[in-house]
Amino acid sequence: MGLLTSAASRAEVPVFPVVGAGGREAAEALWLLPGVRMVDTPRAAAVLVVIGRLTRALLQPVLLVHDQMPGPRATLWWPVDGRPADDGTDGDEGLLAALPDVVTTTAGDAAGLRAVFADLLAGRRPWGPPALADIESPRWRGVGPYGHGGEGMMGGVPYGRPFAEMAQDPDGLMLDQLPLQIGPLFPALPPGLVLHLGLQGDVIRGVTLGDNPYRSWPGDPPVGPLDSVPFLDARTSPTTVAALEVARARHHLRWLARTLRLHGLDARGRRIAALAGGLSATDRPAVEALARRLGRDRGLAGATAGVGVADQATLEPLGIELAGGPVARAAGVAIDARTDDPAYAGLDFEPVVHHGGDARARLRQRVAEAAQALALAERAGDAVRSPGPPVEGPRGPLAPGRTMPSSSLIHLLPTLLDGQEWGDAVTTVASLDLDLEEAAVDQSATAWPQTPTGTSTASTRTP
Amino acid sequence: MATDADRDVDGIDEDAVSWSDPLPAVLLVGAVLVAGAYATSVLDTAAAHLVAGRRLRLGELVLGPWREAALLAHMRRSTTERPDVQTWALAPALLAGMAAVAVATVPLAPGVAVADVADGIVLFGAAMALVMVGVYLHGWSSNSVFPLVGGYRFVALALSYEMPLALVLIAAALPAESLSVGAIVESQQGLWNVVRQPLGLPLFLVAGMGLASWGPLGMSDGTDLAGGTSAESSGGARLVWALARRFVLVAVAVTGAAVFLGGWHGPVLAGGLWMALKTLVLLAVLVGVGHRVARIRLERFVVVAWAVLIPLALIDVFVSGALVL
Amino acid sequence: MSRPELAGVAMWILGGSSVVAAWRVFRTDSMVRAAYWLLASFVAVGMVMVLLQARFLGLVLVLMMAGEMTIMAAFMVMFMMNPAGLNPMSMVHQHTTAKVAGVVAFAGLAFVGVAADFPDRPVDAASEPTAELGEELLGDSMLIFETAGVTLLATMIGAIAIAGKRGRFGNAQEGSAPPPVDPDAPAGPDARPSPMHGGHGGMHH
């Protein structure tokens, strides 16, 4: 092994994570693993880590990401719930069939990941060819006067691709509008979110939601486990208030950590993610100090103020205003299921409310709720909450038979994103704390669609 | 450029001439850029671990940048469909070359300058203007959406910070009554520009952060664009681009140290050491801000640049001019 | 080789580069490549000016053109129908006129170059071209330059004031639409033809 290879195999492992069904909780560990670095694009990655069960709709995008990794490359699978690699579900089988050299390790196993990486660089572990065939559109070659599929100035399909459409921009000019699918694996969006956009420069014109890749089809195992498991369990079984509130604070802090990373603050995000990982009620002073610091943070305020305003009028048609949840409370709606919950009766609970309904208000709302949750956990002692009334989950109220919060929140996107610049759109989506898997609970499916859904990933189809 | 150098040396003894010979010049500028890029990476790792509250082993700190470079060099280069191969390769070379031009105009110690030309500050400005072309081409040539958006973002950014950058450099040249960087350093004997023109250095650092697309102004290669202009770069191409961006940051820090922090002036230590120390301080500031301050919205930066930074830079020029008169 | 000889060689190389780059402007399909070939040509001319001791002007030329060519590329991409050059297109129009104009211009300049009696006044090595330029700008020609400068500044401020009413698209919630060509027709996307498509042949939607 040469000096270069030897040095390279000691570098931080560049990892591109893919969150499959039930993988959100385990994915949190990846960011904090020593000697591992999450990268923004498959082009920079050497190891692809698939966390949780791969659904059928995610298989094709994952293979595309695999092929976009320049190599040497390896694929790791982290099953959740300790299920074996070949439990007979379609998605997993599909992954193992398409990429025969997938290594299965336990979630969060840094040593296993590094061992695969070291073997890969030392040449002890072969790396495979692309999983997908290099197919080009058959209709352009040899067509037209130059044999490239185009004709005249703006006609034909040069190199197999249609021209961008013309559409009006906000200034009233007719400019090119590029139709684009983004997701389900775009790293700056929540895992699984698929957006169909018209893009004029970096300004979004027209948004439709794509298919939810976590939606389970007849014969699939059910989705989950969701990342709000303690709250879902509390619907049906007694839970201590303290455990519930610490889980809430952890959820909000993890969201904050991911959001800071998107705003270019990877290191600050890591610190908060580490805090969230080992969170207990005794961390209240630390979280309160964090809330004060973030309240004073001019840079973060500037990056989020006035972005993605979801005021009461916007929330009302979707039923979010009446339901409550952090997004509604950040718009000044003082509704919280805990107000009427007998378990919280002696705890001096008052819903936290912020005003403005923009990304900044939602950020402050969640941090304030995290601090409040730890204070409640301290005061609650051993108090036990008995099932019955709706549970206030981290994204909104949860009750049997009620739509999940993400299912309503996701329908804010077409309204909020239209006309935004790309960076603001990412800020807006992050500020809503969407979980596509949670939304998939409500999306009943009867039949597998004829054409599988799109395959665009981190780096998009080349126009 | 070097052909004029010896004739244009302003108040510097004749020993300086030898640095403008091809071999010493290349070695000197190359050494400054490589050492600066390495220092940037080390500072960056240290700052990241400090902010994240993670333990840091010395070996990781010292060897980390080399390991990462080795890994990128080891990885394959991938390509996109129908990229503009020539301009894709040109972009990092342009950035690195312009950073080298900028460093060449700065005297690193009394008499140690490759090309301390009479119009050094203008040459720096011209070189930094071409950085914009380099970043835009890097985004454009890969024929992919997110790199292209990153390229356009950089153009909007660059057009906004360039006026304040030019103005504060002009203000710094006023007390020296010369556009030569060496003369500007000489003029700071006794009183550094950072004190004489308190607005100058902060504005210069904001513009410099934009030039290298770093930290809060790193929107051309931001996380929200999946890496922006470098979203499609892999292996050696990625390594070269990362290096080129660090070279620009180093050029900014070296120039800032000379123009605002008095260059080689300072007690006890040798001039070259002072220069290195001041450059490292500026690099640490730039890198540290990158880990503390969130990436700014482009629209907001454009508004701030035109409505706040340019007026501040004008005040800087007017006040500096009045003081000279 | 001595320094003056090196300068002579550099002069020929830069002069040749500027001509070749200018020729490439018309031999590419892409707006961006065309703009940057033109920039390359300007940079070569700027360096020639540096060799001719007009260092300040040469460097300022590079500084300005880097920004201007990028803006030009952005505008061409915005307004051209075929910005990426996906379909080959000629960057040359009105062939006869262009040929005649080119030949006449070349002949004229060549005639002046050969026939004119250029003054032979070697520049004093100790002269300060930048300082002289400053004297000129703020001395005898001050009125002219100040008039032009203040006019340009007012134009720029006005343009920014018109364009930048709270953000990139004015009051972003309201948007804007082009005024209709026909006063009775409603404002809308097709009310105005897209600019800059004359001379490129027909539109195929």
Image (cartoon, coloured by chain):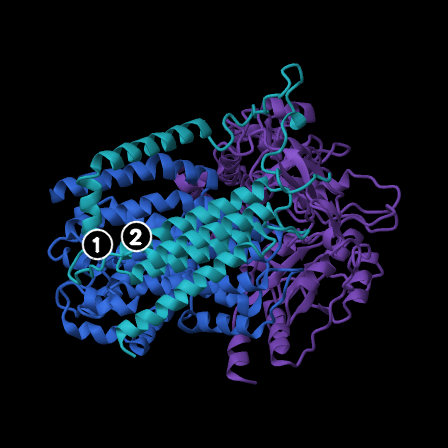
Q: Which residue is mark 1?
A: C129
**Chain letter for the cyan part:** C
User: In the rendered structure, are the residues bearing label 1 and label 2 in contact, judged by CB atoms less than 8 Å apart?
Assistant: yes
Most distant residue in the top direction: C184
Most distant residue in the bottom direction: A1
Disc assigned to residue C57: 2
Whether C177 is drawn above or below A230: the answer is above
Is residue C64 left or right of B8 when viewed as pictured? right
Visual hue assigned to chain A: purple
Is residue A178 left or right of B167 when viewed as pictured? right
Whichever of callouts 1 and 2 sits on the residue coming sooner in the sequence is: 2
* Chain designation of label 2: C
Pointer 2 local density, CA inside 10 Å: few below 14, some 14–19, many at least 20? some
Quadrant containing the C terminus of chain C is top right
Query: Which residue shows up at 45% across the image and 50% down it?
Result: C105
Q: Please provide percent x and percent y for residue A46.
A: 61, 67
Query: Which residue shows up at 68% across the image and 59% down it?
Result: A65
**Chain letter for the blue part:** B
Instruction: Residue B279: name its quadrant.
Output: bottom left
Give the amino acid type for the residue marked by disc 2 in the picture. Answer: Leu
